[in-house]
Image (spheres, rainbow, N blue to C red):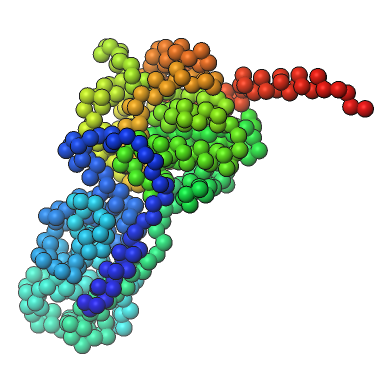
């Protein structure tokens, strides 16, 4: 048994390693310094990423424990699991059985099986229910009864038969006879053989679970659910051997538009989105930064630079020429950085629903939620960690997420209409939950990058810039955005009446028509072509 467990630990260690997908570029020092509060927030986010992204998809109720045995994260029907476990003291094998309210649990030492696990994630507990034996243990006579299962749980947890009978409120003789029936069902003759048989089944389950391919396609399944056959998913090979996921919508031979998504979803909800794109001859491309595996998101500026260079390489490879960049909300900071770093790849920049400019300040009487957040983050960066932890907790509860989402936009009827529609369609909460489970570190990066002063980049951009801002935007009022547009002679700001912050989703037709417009540089190129044609000698 010891050899089997040692072999399992070695196999798990090999299987649990995750390859790094993108090599980080060199950037200045870490964004948050050494503030202990932020280090704690980052540690909590790392634990959450480990739980949802590194651990395999168990089909049993499972929870993660700290060093004291207190549950810090749980998944599945884990209501029967205790909130605190009696841990095995000094267990060198990193594995033990426990019992709680007549239910059997297996407890694994995280450090034994995942050496790269983050600090604070100490133990993993799984509930081994009665159905487990039906699925994974070949019983010789008949399935286990509830009473037989409870006796097994007591015995594997370390109780003698006499003590187990007392705990179960039965006589020793009754449980002794029942144990003989259990022996027959498992094809064994004593308790030691029974424990070995059950342990072997559990080890086989662990090996099969860890050996199976991890499911990193949750976002693709969700994408397919909402868009059926109207989305193409690519994986672009980069020079460093990494792969960058690309989602493509609309007219595949149309005008290429590179979409920089916001915080709440990697794409936009609009029931006839793809039809609108095709009607306007637009090829809509998304590099979903929340779902790039193996990237170190702990340093947002490094991630920003790495992502920017990867997208630039993708544009060269997949498109071969300049694109129109379109951005919403927190995607704006990523888009302006890309435009400033690679101006030759950007034909035009369209910003639909810009966030509040981080370099600006607003009077308290006129301060929007985003303006208040910007001020709070500037004064205390720990706010970012607190927001993300609250976001992740809310995102895993659809009912709470819906209430919180609507509450944030309670003063904007235009936005509430969009939110209610996306919730009813099953769109918004599905993406919120997936991002909350898989991409908390990416949310931190988004919040941090959004505060880096992207608005100061606008004045130096040389391509045409169009701002589309809702007149009824309560998150980011139009006046500061209009003033920002005035800092660049190539920029314009169009204020759209009766529209809130979710302009891109509520007026997708308007956004598409704006993207389809012929830009000044395209007009100049066409005029140059006509002049060259007119000057050429006639063909005889």
Q: Nearer the viewer, residue 339 or 467?
A: 339
Left or right of 22 in this view: 319: right
Q: In which image quadrant can residue 33 be found?
A: top left
Q: Residue at x 24, y 30 (%)?
A: 381
Judge from the rendering whether residue 113 lies leftward or rightward of residue 500; answer left or right. left
In percent of the image, x 53 and y 41: which residue is there? 314
Q: Give the vertical position of 461 relative to 435 (above or below).
A: above
Instruction: Say whether residue 105 is visible.
Output: no
Q: Vertically, is 174 above or below 409?
A: below
Looking at the rendering, in which quadrant would you find the C terminus?
Answer: top right
Residue furthest to the right in view is 540
> Residue 209 in the image: x percent, y percent?
35, 65
On screen, residue 492 above or below 232? above
Which of these two is toward me, 279 or 295?
295
Measured as percent of width and height from the top left, residue 420 is found at 41, 32
Q: Position of residue 95 (x, y in %)?
A: 19, 68
Q: In this image, 293 relative to 518: left or right?
A: left
Tell me which residue sits at (21%, 60%) in the image.
111
**Residue 415 percent coordinates (x, y):** 41, 25
**Residue pushed farthest bottom?**
189
């Amino acid at each position: 048994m010891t050899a089997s467990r040692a072999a399992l630990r070695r196999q798990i260690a090999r299987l649990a390693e995750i390859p790094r997908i993108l090599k980080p570029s060199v950037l200045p020092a870490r964004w948050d310094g050494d503030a202990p509060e932020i280090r704690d927030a980052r540690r909590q986010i790392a634990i959450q990423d480990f739980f949802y992204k590194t651990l395999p998809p168990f089909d049993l109720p499972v929870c993660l424990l700290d060093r004291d045995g207190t549950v810090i994260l749980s998944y599945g029907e884990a209501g029967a699991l205790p909130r605190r476990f009696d841990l095995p003291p000094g267990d060198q094998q990193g594995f033990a059985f426990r019992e709680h309210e007549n239910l059997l649990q297996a407890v694994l030492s995280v450090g034994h099986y995942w050496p790269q696990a983050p600090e604070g994630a100490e133990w993993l507990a799984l509930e081994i229910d009665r159905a487990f034996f039906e699925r994974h243990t070949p019983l010789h006579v008949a399935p286990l009864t509830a009473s037989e299962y409870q006796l097994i749980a007591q015995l594997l947890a370390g109780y003698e038969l006499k003590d187990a009978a007392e705990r179960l409120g039965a006589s020793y003789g009754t449980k002794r006879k029942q144990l003989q029936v259990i022996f027959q069902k498992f094809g064994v003759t004593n308790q030691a053989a029974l424990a070995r048989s059950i342990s072997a089944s559990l080890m086989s389950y662990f090996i099969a679970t860890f050996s199976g391919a991890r499911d990193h396609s949750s976002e693709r399944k969700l994408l397919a659910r909402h868009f059926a056959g109207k989305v193409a998913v690519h994986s672009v090979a980069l020079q460093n051997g990494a792969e960058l996921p690309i989602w493509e919508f609309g007219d595949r031979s149309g005008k290429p538009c590179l979409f920089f998504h916001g915080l709440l979803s990697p794409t936009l909800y609009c029931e006839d989105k793809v039809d609108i794109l095709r009607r306007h001859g637009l090829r809509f491309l998304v590099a979903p930064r929340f779902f790039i595996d193996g990237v170190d998101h702990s340093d947002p500026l490094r991630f920003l630079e790495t992502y920017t260079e990867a997208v630039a390489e993708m544009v060269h490879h997949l498109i071969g020429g300049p694109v129109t960049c379109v951005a919403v909300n927190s995607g704006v900071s990523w888009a302006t950085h890309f435009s400033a770093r690679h101006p030759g790849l950007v034909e035009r920049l369209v910003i639909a629903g810009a966030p509040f400019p981080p370099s600006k300040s607003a009077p308290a009487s006129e301060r929007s939620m985003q303006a208040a957040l910007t001020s709070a983050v500037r004064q205390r960066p720990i706010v970012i960690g607190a927001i993300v932890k609250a976001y992740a907790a809310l995102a895993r509860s659809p009912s709470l997420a819906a209430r919180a989402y609507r509450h944030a936009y309670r003063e904007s009827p235009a936005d509430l209409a969009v939110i209610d529609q996306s919730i009813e369609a099953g769109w918004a909460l599905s993406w919120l939950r997936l991002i909350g489970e898989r991409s908390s570190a990416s949310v931190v990066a988004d919040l941090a990058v959004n505060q880096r002063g992207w608005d100061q980049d606008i004045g130096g951009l040389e391509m045409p810039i169009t701002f589309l801002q809702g007149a009824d935007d309560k998150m980011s009022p139009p006046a500061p955005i209009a003033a920002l547009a005035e800092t660049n002679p190539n920029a314009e700001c169009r204020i759209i009446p009766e529209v809130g912050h979710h302009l891109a989703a509520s007026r997708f037709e308007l956004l598409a028509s704006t993207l389809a417009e012929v830009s000044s540089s395209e007009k100049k190129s066409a005029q140059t072509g006509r002049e060259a044609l007119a000057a050429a000698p006639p063909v005889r």
